[in-house]
Image: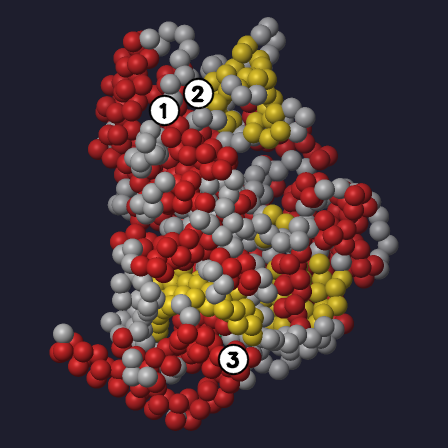
Amino acid sequence: NTTLDKILWRKSLQLRDRQEYWEASVEGRRMVESRRSLPAFKQRDSVLTAISKNQVIVISGETGCGKTTQIPQFILESEIDANRGALCSIICTQPRRISAMSVSERVAYERGEQLGESVGYKVRLEGVRGRDTRLLFCTTGILLRRLLVDRNLRGVTHVIVDEIHERGMNEDFLLIILKDLLSRRPELKLILMSATLDAELFSSYFCGASVIHIPGFTYPVRSHFLEDILEMTRYRLTPYNQIDDYGQERTWKMHKQIPKKRKSQIAFVVEDALRAADFKEFSTETQESLSCWNPDCIGFNLIEFLLWHICENEGPGGILVFMTGWDDISSLKEKLQIHPIFGNPDRIMLLACHGSMASFEQRLIFEEPASGVRKIILATNIAETSITINDVAFVIDCGKAKETSYDALNNTPCLLPSWISKVSAQQRRGRAGRVRPGQCYHLYPKCVYDAFAEYQLPEILRTPLQSLCLQIKSLNLGSISEFLLRALQSPELLAVQKAIEYLKIIGALDENEYLTTLGRYLSKLPMEPKLGKMLILGAILGCLDPILTVVAGLSVRDPFLTPQDKKDLADAAKFQFSRDHSDHLALVRAYEGWKKAEEESAVYDYCWKNFLSIQSMRAIDSLRKEFFSLLKDTGLIDGNPSICNSEGNDANLTRAVICYGMYPGICSVVHNDRSFSLKTMEDGQVLLYSNSVNARERKIPYPWLVFNEKIKVNSVFLRDSTAVSDSTLILFGGSISKGDIDGHLKMLGGYLEFFMKPVVAEICQTLKKELAELIQN
Ligand code: ADP
Ligand code: MG
């Protein structure tokens, strides 16, 4: 088409003129200068030559050397220089939405443009791009979604996959698809970028793709572990045994009342935390024993002490604090804001850096503070490699991390904090040495560090594969197990088979491994299928509100606290919320109370009285909103909360939905004279966790318990459980028959008909089939 060619040619010339004009301007020249000072610039020509000669290249380089902001621009500029500007289309993926947004903004700025001209971004629910956008930053999930409708990525000339060293599930998944695509699209270029040196792995996966390394430089950083920090507090220690999440609140309150004793208070807490963890024993223990060491219990007080210590005794330089998640960050920020030193904007520039921050906040992170003002940034592991803050000289590292991004195609985001690897700890430490020699404070003993895993296992090898299997099916990629064999590191066959079997049991896949209607909806929800199932049915049956609380509650750290010395009191407090033989419904009540307390600005008292973790309750509150908007995305609900909640007060209906999600996590209740015992099909006798509300009952007036999770210690223990009746189980769980059920079925059959909307017609069908079979037998 010659007219089209002409238009494209003219556009390409315009782009070139615009670029030359910018580079000749005063600001443009200054920008070019500062870009030239980045290590990546020295490799510009070799990168461009390698790209022109190869279909796939791998680029590795120290964080902050300019991979993310520069490499995509080098490609764009060289295309524009060659008058192909209007013909190229470069996609650069980021594991997190926040980096896609902030990087695109930065790159547009470096090019003297507004976002949406030649540079744009697209993340779930948001995006800025125009008709002439040539360089698009997006999340990995967005590119996967595009592949759903456009499997050959028509028109795309370059795909850049950034941060591949993180080995997220989505990135590994994308690489398999791209590898297949390369042969169908021989002119498509693939560029992989990594912050670590293990580029060989990726290179050999792509049949010896060429590797370019960008050398960098960092200053030495001194490490302090918890024992050194303890030494630093240098105050006499007295026993004080309140060392958990809960104690944290209390010590905070105490030092508000007696500020003079503050430092020694901190010392108590550190000492106790060390004693509680019995850390001297750790060196010989395995990774598993680390789970009883909880840095959160010392977190806030100790961080506050260190901040104070650095401000009083150390030279200039920003402080970067790595925390587990945004809920911890916002709690700490709130506390620091009312502090005489840290809350004073003339002395401290206090910022947060996490996945859900607003973009004006993002910009502040890169801003230089006024002289005499120190920057303090509370960050999640996002600041480990994806965002580089230049003027940091001190790092405080809590040693744990959790994933906080929910892109619609993300698989099972792991919301529970877990230990980082040695590589991550070193990476965090390295952040302190970019501008001058720095210091790093680790909030855990050296022996705990020694027990860290060398590397984080790739997500595909460590998380359940159910969601990934659903993605493979929804993208029509054929047999699940054959597809996964082609991964960079393929998961064990047994794990794959288990996942497929599970998906069949819960009705997401049919006998022949095809996606069912339910499966299709589940593939759009970025959480474990069982949680997705609950949300879907909760919305359909009109009890979404309590179900949102249950699902959010299952995604965070248990909000019900059990301090060692107050176990009975704490369990009793939880029991107060129980009326229905259900831990899940107890949480729903606790949350309702919290909401009310929030309106009355009494959350601290409420949580204190009821042994609830403020952080967890806050996290639940915000996750509920997140999940609601995800559901809206799937098109299942139209955003009017009252419609999906007409039956929100019906505890039995909520119970049924919980059963629908938990199945096949089920055990039968066998009563004897005094008490009852529990049995599952696989384990025989099982026990309840002592803080379960059902553990305090003598009798359970239901024949079954459904549960989310079982943990094998010496015996098998069930975490949270909910009691359900025969009929609930048969209608909402699966085909387990017990006793005479014909009567129930007739009654409940009508009930189901009444509530079911077309969307669950299929679920209804299977249920009916099962019922029919049951009646026949
Ligand atoms: P890499 O991807 O190799 O880790 P980046 O391309 O992200 O490195 O960053 C290169 C440099 O640009 C770093 O020094 C970083 O501090 C700076 N930078 C990145 N984003 C911004 C921004 N929004 N504002 C100011 N400086 C930034
Ligand atoms: Mg980067």
Seen from this angle, which residue lies furthest front? 207
Badge 3 marks a residue whose secondary structure is loop
Check the image and report above or below for 277 versus 74. above
Q: Quadrant of the N terminus?
A: bottom left
Which one is in front in this view, the residue at disc 2 or the one at disc 1?
1
Amino acid type at circle 2 is Val
Gap in Å between the C-alphas at discs 2 and 1? 10 Å
Check the image and report above or below for 60 versus 582. below
Frontmost residue, 461 versus 533: 461
User: What residue appears at the point 64 percent right and 76 percent down from the top-left corner?
Assistant: 217
Which one is in front in this view, the residue at disc 3 or the one at disc 1?
3
In the picture provided, is 110 more to the left or to the right than 711?
left
* Residue behind mark 3: 43
Badges 2 and 1: C-beta atoms under 8 Å apart?
yes
Badge 3 or badge 1: first in the primary sequence = 3
Mark 3, ligand 1, within 8 Å: the answer is: no
Residue 219 sits in quarter: bottom right
* Residue behind mark 2: 724
Badge 2 or badge 1: first in the primary sequence = 2
Frontmost residue, 485 versus 86: 485
Colour scheme of the picture: secondary structure
In the picture provided, is 174 more to the left or to the right than 168?
left
* Residue behind mark 1: 732
